Image (cartoon, helix red, strand yellow):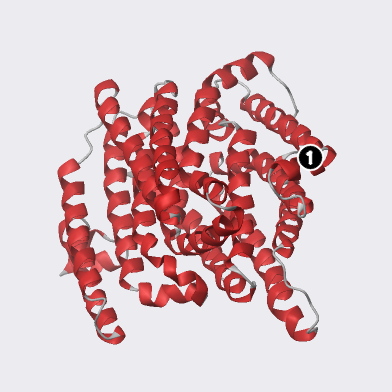
Amino acid sequence: MANLKSLAKDTAIYGLSSIVGRFLNYLMVPLYTYTLKSCADYGIYNDIYAQTALLMVLLTFGMETTFFRFMNKEEGDKMRVYSTALMMVGGVCLTFAALVLLFITPLANALDYPNHKWYVGMMFVTVAQDAFQAIPFAYLRYKHRPIKFASLKLLFIFMSVTLNLVAYWLMPKIDPSWQIHIGYAFAINLTCTTIISFCLVSELVGFKWQFDTQKCKQMLSYSWPLLVLGIAGILNQVAGQILLPRILDSAEGRHQLGIYGACIKIAMIMALITQAFRFAYEPIVFGSAKDKNSKELYAKSMKFFVIFTLLAFLCVMGYIDIFKYLVGDKFREGLGIVPIVMMAEIFMGVYFNLSFWYKLIDKTIYGAWFSLAGCAVLFAVNVIFIPQIGYWACAWGGLAGYGTAMVLSYIVGQKQNPIPYPIKDIALYMVLAGTLFCLMQASKGWHTIVSLSFNTLLIVLFVAFIIRRDMPLSSLPVIGKKFRRN
């Protein structure tokens, strides 16, 4: 129970930084989609960011999870593990950044951005810094310091939002000749990331830097399957965005990618919930691995993760007539993909929860195979269907890919390291949420106010069901005291 309370508290703090940060980041979506001249301009932004997401996985090569595993296994000098991880990731990132700057012109040409080589250069140097920062941030999570973690994340977001507002909103009002282009976004990201790097200096001093060759070999042995898993996992998220402008005609592909990239931002509330849960869950899982009640913790955590992600799904879909104003008029034709992408994100979150069975028994190769299978399905759907249905194939491909990995992980996991997940309870909530979603879809033709009121009622019914069945008010902190007295 103590672990569950710690999980809830840390998830709330990590979640607050993610929620506030993502909300402020949402401001960038209307800012870009209302001010940029074309969907294709926003398509360039999404294309380069998709590539940097893949690079982030390559440059960290599974060291975040490996760090937690070895810090909890280490009986002696734990800082030796930390400093070894820092030097491994730092060496790779420094080498990568130097090579990018040295070969920026041929690199930009190869990526089909000969006229925007510094867009590529700025973002690739930014991702090198982000990758190195992953280890100090992981150390903050290991030390259970969510306040500093969240503060730095929020600082980045506030700086980024402020500078973007200046570049895309204030300057055009001050100077009518100010030229708006997507390059400002890349320059701002590089600036803010560099400032955060300086803010992490205190996590890089105060201990003896040591490189343990033996520990390095052990950590690489553990992490390389995680790297394969990570590559496959991130490809499940961004492969469609990378493939779209390369399977279709370049101009048309970037136009469709702009629409797709804008609309999936509405669905990203699911990704933020998964991320907040992961930040809190990972240290607790590894820390409680020897606890005799650990499997019960994993099972309950899975159940409540599904419940609250389904609630988030219903909230977004119930108020889609409001959320649609996050994107400009020319992007709204893609709103139909939002429920598909959100369900894909739920599948991804479930898959992440399932993944701990093989991480805890040091058989991460299973995760690599599951993710590769999902990735193969995603690639097949995209390659076959993008020429016919464009960005819709990206949405369906993600759902099929995550669904494949999720099912495989559950089936094999129940044989290798069974955990008593409450499948019947989870299925009940899935069916109920699906039914309410269908009712919301049926109300689409109604007057907006009537439709929103009806959808609100459905959401309230779902919340009431949760409270009655799994979260009675008497069990809640503060408010529960009143109900217990009564």
- Residue 188 placement (x, y as % from top left): 73, 61
- Residue 62 placement (x, y as % from top left): 55, 31
Q: Is 267 on the left or on the right of 302, as rendered? A: right
Callout 1 crowding tier (Cα within 10 Å): few <14, some 14–19, many ≥20: some
Quadrant for the N terminus in the image: top left
Quarter-of-image position of residue 128: top right
- Residue 409 placement (x, y as % from top left): 32, 31
Q: Image height check: is 180 above or below 218?
A: below
Q: Image height check: is 288 above or below 26?
A: above
Residue matched to label 1? 106
Residue type indicated by callout 1 = Pro
| Residue 2 seen | no
Q: Residue at x 36, y 72 (%)?
A: 320
Q: Residue furthest top?
A: 214
| Residue 44 seen | yes
Q: Residue at x 72, y 35 (%)?
A: 93
Q: Is 179 on the left or on the right of 169, as rendered? A: right
Q: Residue at x 68, y 39 (%)?
A: 132
Secondary structure under tag 1 reads helix
Q: Image height check: is 155 above or below 104?
A: below
Quadrant for the C terminus in the image: bottom left
